[in-house]
Image: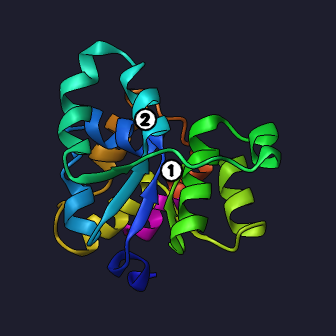
Amino acid sequence: MSEFFQRPVVCNTSPVISLSKAGLGHLFASLFPKVLTTRKVVEELQAKDASDALSIQATLGAFEILPTPPVDPMLSTILDPGEASVMQLAKEHGISGLVLDERLGRRVAMDVFGLEVVGTCGLLLRAKKLSLLPEVKAPLDLIIANGLFVSPRLRLQCLRLARE
């Protein structure tokens, strides 16, 4: 898994929102050599609550934002536009890693496209392993309190992996 963090990735909306709201948007630049996203994801982010706009904009400052590629019509029928755009971008640029939280999107990315996927919990675990965070529990609980749905089972698994 550590090899995942040594390559460029394409990132969807929810990890940006989650880490930005928790004041941890800077982790993207510390965890990856390059993070790309699409204009469609940026549009979705800009449509969110204005109180988060500055922190989201700061997070996006470390991203390479590329035009939204034409999306395979089949993807558009099962995924939201941002998810479909990041998968298409990864496919077109030969990038094998996605940062994505949504369950259906993760399943499609892995099963259909053979992509590796890490979500917000995985980012927190890696940040702790690299001593970028002293713990996972407090940031994870803040992220959950700020609106990211994390099942109790996933939360427990994340904390167990963090040895907390």
Above or below residue 39? Residue 90 is below
Say which of 49 and 144 sits in front.
49
The residue depicted at 20 percent of the width and 32 percent of the height is 55
- Report the magenta residues as a range: 157-162
Instruction: Please say whether residue 161 is one of the residues in the magenta stretch.
Output: yes
**Is 30 positioned to the left or the right of 84 in the image?**
left
Q: Position of residue 141 (x, y in %)?
A: 36, 39
* Residue ID for mark 2: 144
Q: Residue furthest bottom?
A: 3
The quadrant the C terminus occupies is: bottom left
C-beta proximity under 8 Å, tags 1 and 2: yes
Q: State the image quarter where residue 33 is shown.
A: bottom left
The residue depicted at 58 percent of the width and 47 percent of the height is 85
Instruction: Please say whether residue 17 is one of the residues in the magenta stretch.
Output: no
Q: State the image quarter where residue 28 is shown.
A: bottom left
Dominant SS of magenta comes to helix
* Residue ID for mark 1: 155
Q: Position of residue 159 (x, y in %)?
A: 43, 59
